[in-house]
């Protein structure tokens, strides 16, 4: 299986990248982003990693020739909406996602496209919460494309394997919660996931599919054993 990852330097993306490189069924991992992800990747696993550094993620036309022959795309690129205008958040969340999904659907018929959304996403696109509306709009647009599309909606995520969030506020939050996250994960298994869980679930869905197109936390956990 050949996979492409957008957002591999982020917390979830780095976890997915790690699991892809460890999985013997994955022969090639291509990361596309503005900064390299390979410097976070240990050992001989890097031999199946290829990276494209591309500044303008809103326009992939100049690298389309390198985006063919893939079986799955894991789209983990995203930012916190804190302090952002709706227009700015829409450009990063909706526009960049569709800028990747549309050419990939054309270049790789039948590709599985897994989009990391979030718990509380608003599929109606009508609610009061700005980020939830835009995430819902993005999910709905992906589900209309000729893709084998799945939406992942994780809630609280426990970072493992030295992975850290790129968002300063989240790093502080995770530092405060670190002693309690393992306990929360055991006590609330359908509300707390780890970066390993999400990466392994993405690979499982890419290989075998899943009964639902929108996966909440309990579905993501169930997919690992599917």
Image (cartoon, rainbow, N blue to C red):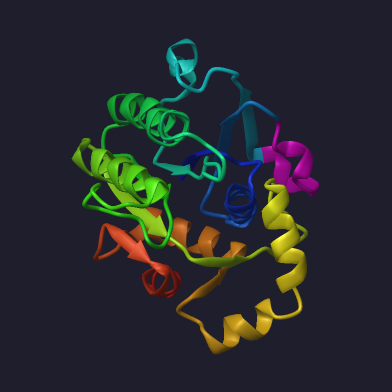
Residue 175 magenta: no
Pick the residue in front: 50 or 196.
Answer: 196
Pick the residue in front: 113 or 173.
Answer: 173
Residue 43 magenta: yes
Q: How many discs appear?
A: 0
Give residue 174's position: percent from left, percent from top: 71, 64
Residue 48, image quadrant: top right
Residue drawn at x 42%, y 70% as measured from the top left? 217
Q: Determine whether, in the image, residue 223 is placed left or right of residue 9.
A: left
Q: Which residues are magenta?
A: 36-47
Q: Confirm whether residue 114 shows in the render.
A: no
Give residue 77's position: percent from left, percent from top: 52, 40
Residue drawn at x 25%, y 47% as measured from the top left? 125
Pick the residue in front: 113 or 55.
Answer: 55
Give residue 226's position: percent from left, percent from top: 37, 72
Residue that protrudes farthest toward the top in the picture? 62
Residue 204, image quadrant: bottom left
Residue drawn at x 38%, y 34% as measured from the top left? 94
Q: Determine whether, in the image, residue 183 is placed left or right of residue 39.
A: left
Q: Main secondary structure of the magenta part?
A: helix
Q: Is residue 150 above or below residue 154?
A: above
């Amino acid at each position: 299986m050949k996979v492409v990852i957008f957002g591999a330097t982020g917390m979830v993306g780095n976890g997915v990248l790690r699991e892809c490189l460890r999985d013997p069924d994955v022969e090639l991992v291509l990361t596309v982003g503005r900064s390299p992800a390979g410097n976070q990747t240990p050992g001989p696993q890097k031999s199946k990693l290829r990276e494209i550094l591309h500044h303008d993620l809103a326009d992939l036309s100049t690298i389309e020739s390198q985006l063919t022959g893939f079986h799955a795309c894991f789209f983990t690129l995203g930012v916190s909406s804190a302090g952002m205008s709706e227009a700015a958040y829409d450009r990063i969340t909706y526009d960049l996602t569709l800028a990747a999904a549309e050419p990939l659907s054309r270049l790789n018929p039948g590709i599985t496209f897994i989009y990391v959304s979030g718990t509380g996403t608003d599929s109606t696109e009508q609610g009061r919460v700005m980020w939830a509306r835009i995430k819902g709009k993005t999910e709905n647009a992906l589900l209309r494309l000729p893709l084998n599309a799945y939406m992942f909606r994780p809630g609280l995520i426990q970072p493992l394997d030295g992975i850290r969030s790129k968002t300063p506020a989240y790093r502080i939050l995770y530092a405060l919660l670190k002693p309690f996250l393992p306990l929360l994960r055991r006590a609330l298994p359908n509300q707390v996931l780890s970066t390993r869980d999400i990466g392994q679930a993405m690979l499982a869905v890419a290989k075998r599919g899943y009964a639902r197109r929108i996966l909440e936390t309990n579905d993501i956990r169930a997919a690992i054993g599917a």
